[in-house]
Amino acid sequence: MKPYYLLHLMPYYNSNSFSIPFLKSLSFLLFYAAAFCSSSSQTPTLVLPLKTQIIPTGSIPRPPNKLPFHHNVSLTVSLTVGTPPQNVSMVIDTGSELSWLHCNKTPNFPTTFDPARSTSYSPIPCSSPTCTTQTQDFPIPASCDNNNLCHATLSYADASSSEGNLASDTFYFGSSDIPGMVFGCMDSSFSSNSDEDSKSTGLMGMNRGSLSFVSQMRFPKFSYCISGSDFSGLLLLGEANFSWLTPLNYTPLIQISTPLPYFDRVAYTVQLEGIKVSDKLLSLPKSVFVPDHTGAGQTMVDSGTQFTFLLGPVYTALRNEFLNRTAGILRVLEDPNFVFQGAMDLCYRVPLNQPKLPRLPTVTLMFRGAEMTVSGDWILYRVPGQVRGSDSVHCLTFGNSDLLGVEAFVIGHHHQQNVWMEFDLEKSRIGLAQMRCDLAGQRFSVGQ
């Protein structure tokens, strides 16, 4: 049995998390992490202190075709880097490849990594295969600076940017050390949200790119399960061969070898084949779910997105069917000027004194080989701070990608609650199964 690493998530709610100038979401507080391994393994136990950081719109780098998220859960891990070790805090992001650290201490970034203090720090030259071949999936190609060092530039959704050199150094997780980990040592940054950005030292990329953390660590798979009752859950790195685990249905990851302008080749991309509202399959041609010759129209599973976004024709069909099904059950918000998150324009007025929502139709996302059903309280989302007379405002938790100028379907974590999600990198597939994620956490006796 291969060793596996278990991270436990506990809920954290910030009552001020919806303040202007940016919206923030309910977030997870990861306060405890433990690594378990078989008795025959010599791999040491890892204990990683994790916590939540709330990140504003555009404060993490995204490829051009990724959503400029308004609601974003960010999970941070505290570790040490360099020789002697320096304390850093890194945001874990499944939508990014390059891990990076702020390396230039400024008033905006007081917590940084100082490469001059590390004897194991090694900048990567332009001639290195790491620079010439392993950076091909970066949103902006790597370049060569005046010192013949590999130079990386990260673009942000809000026009912020960060740039610096690729380097390698030793990363420490608990008592384990990982020498030669490649990352970006960023010495120049521009940010429109410096107060929030200063809360972490950098970012840990977790996508399928060759320089992501999971790729460099060669994890065969990782899984997570987010509870729908209390927003707790667990993240597991490695194999998950447990007798109590519900059998998973697998959908293959879509891979395109040829670079296309609107296709993110290192995202977790699956094939969406249809959508049902309750028992009715939406009348849509299969072609609307297939990426076109430019790569536009891929379906990405991204835990960094809160809600799910669909391309215009698909969203319109879902919106119309859901509207018909809820006629006489819910009162539509008649306000053409209100579009939640700029993409969610089907909203309802619900009396503030109404204890719970009426029974609502389900929405099932049909993937190749697997399905994900959204029901109950996960269909509508109460918009914080929005009140119309004596009514609260609830919006459909599916948005229109076209309104954001994004040419992709994105499956967000809100619809992954109470679903065991396994990212099998070895077999290029994602497995999923409905389950009580709070009970899954109890199986490991964490958080008790």
Image (spheres, rainbow, N blue to C red):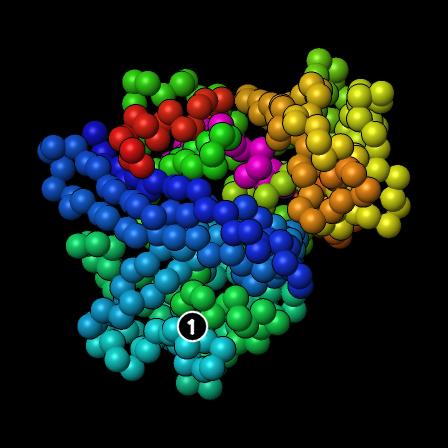
Q: Position of residue 89 (x, y in %)?
A: 37, 62
Of residues 121 and 446, which is closer to you in this image? 446
Of residues 167 and 77, which is closer to you in this image? 77
Q: Position of residue 117 (x, y in %)?
A: 26, 80
User: Does the segment drawn in magenta span residue 425?
Assistant: yes
* Left or right side of 289 for 303: left
* Left or right side of 297 for 105: left
Taking the spot 57% from the left edge, 55% from the top edge, the residue there is: 16
Taking the spot 58% from the left edge, 25% from the top edge, the residue there is: 372
Can residue 254 be seen from the camera position used here?
no
Taking the spot 55% from the left edge, 22% from the top edge, the residue there is: 370
- Give SS at disc 1: strand
Quadrant holding the C terminus: top left
Count of marks placed on residues: 1
Task: Report the magenta residues as a range.
Answer: 410-429
Q: Is residue 125 above or below residue 369?
A: below
- The residue singled out by tag 1 in the image is 102
